[in-house]
Structure formats: structure tokens, C-alpha cells
């Protein structure tokens, strides 16, 4: 049986991320992808997912 995974970051519910995934070729999506390369919150979010064995979302 799978254990529920608790994610403490707001990145998984970010409305900008959701819009970026729906329309990846728009300017706001490109800005969001640029932002994730520098954002300490996103880096912590992906490390937290990796440590729990959850696949990291592609950006």
C-alpha cells in the first residue's frame, strides 16, 4: 500500500505553474521556467520530492 506524501511547499498548487503547464509556449511560461532555475523554494520542493521517491515535474 502506498504511503500518502505530504508536500509542504506551495509550488504544487501555484496558479502560475498550472498555467505554464497548460500553455508552455507563452511568455509568462518562459518567465516561470526561468524563475525556477533561481528560486530556492522550487529547489527545496524538487529535493523534497526526490527524497520521498516522487517524480519531479518537468519544467
Image (cartoon, rainbow, N blue to C red):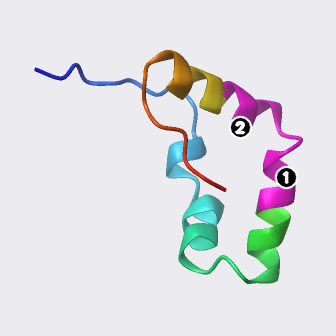
* Location of residue 28 in the rendering, given as x and y in whole percent from the top left corner: 78, 74
Tell me the chief SS of the magenta region. helix
In this rendering, the answer to whether 35 lies above or below 3 is below
Occupied quadrant, residue 11: top right
Disc 2 element: helix
Mark drawn on residue 7: none
User: Which quarter of the figure is the C terminus placed in?
Assistant: bottom right
Where does the magenta region start and end? Answer: 33-44
Q: Is residue 25 magenta?
A: no
Residue behind mark 2: 42
Mark 1 sits on what residue?
A: 35
Taking 46 as reference, is 17 above or below it?
below
Rendered position, 21 above or below 1: below
Left or right placement of residue 30 versus residue 45 in this view = right
In the image: residue 8, left or right of residue 32? left
Q: Residue 57, position in %: x, y?
A: 55, 48
- Considering only vertical position in the picture, is 14 above or below 52? below
- N-terminal of the two: label 1 or label 2? 1
Q: x and y percent of residue 58 in the render?
A: 60, 52
Give me the residue at 22% from left, 19% from top: 3
Kind of element beneath mark 1: helix
Q: Residues within 10 Å of mark 2 (few under 14, many from 20)?
A: some
Q: Residue at x 54, y 24 (%)?
A: 50
Is 58 situated left or right of 31 in this image?
left
Amino acid at each position: 500500500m502506498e504511503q500518502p506524501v505530504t508536500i509542504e511547499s506551495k509550488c504544487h498548487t501555484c496558479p502560475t505553474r498550472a498555467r505554464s503547464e497548460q500553455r508552455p509556449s507563452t511568455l509568462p511560461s518562459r518567465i516561470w521556467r526561468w524563475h525556477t532555475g533561481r528560486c530556492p523554494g522550487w529547489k527545496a520542493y524538487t529535493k523534497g520530492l526526490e527524497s520521498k521517491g516522487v517524480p519531479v515535474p518537468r519544467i
